[in-house]
Image: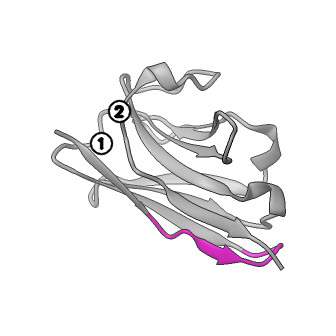
Amino acid sequence: QVQLVESGGGLVQPGGSLRLSCAASGGFLHNYAISWFRQVSGKGREGVLCISKHGDATAFSDSVKGRFTISRDNSKNTVYLQMSNLTIEDTAVYYCAKDLVHFCLPQASTDEYDYWGRGTQVTVAS
């Protein structure tokens, strides 16, 4: 049973940066694509970025292009989300999820993921 644990969330001022981590246990992530999603209370889960088995990144949201990057360290079984130039609109609970396949689809669909973390809160406020 794969378990994903997100960390690195917190309170940051607009324009600031955070790096989120998604650590896996009970299985290896290196053969699968991993994505980050985010969710604002009362709204659906939004895909943010995906990284394929080979390290290719796909952005699901235009709002994060140029500001967020995704990376993976297979030796640590961990995927990262580096967030820069944060805005109030980035406030959400951020989740990582393991895809069923090794590549990223052009559009995010929660049906494509079989394991999810519990999320980490990111709050952007002055």
Question: How many numbered marks have been drawn onto this rendered protein structure?
Answer: 2
What residue is at 81 percent from the left and 55 percent from the top?
A: 89
Report the magenta residues as a range.
7-16
> Which quarter of the image is occupied by the N terminus?
top left
In the rendered structure, the answer to whether residue 40 lies left or right of residue 97 reads right
| Tags 1 and 2 touching, CB below 8 Å | yes
Q: Which residue is mark 1?
A: 29
Task: Mark 2: give few (<14), some (14-19) or many (20+) Cα within 10 Å.
Answer: some
Give the image location of residue 109, x and y in percent: 56, 22
The residue positioned 46% from the left and 46% from the top of the image is 96
Residue 9 painted magenta? yes
**What predominant SS class does the magenta segment belong to?**
loop
Residue 104, horizontal then vertical, whole percent: 52, 27
Q: Quadrant of the rendered structure where residue 126 is?
A: bottom right
Q: Secondary structure at mark 2?
A: loop
Q: Is residue 59 left or right of 32 when viewed as pictured?
A: right
List the residue tagged with mark 2: 32
In terms of image quadrants, where is residue 62? top right
Q: Is residue 96 within the magenta segment?
A: no
| Residue 106 placement, left or right of 8 | right
Above or below, 113 relative to 118: above
**Residue 23 image point, x, y percent:** 33, 57
Vertical comparison of 117 with 107: above or below = below
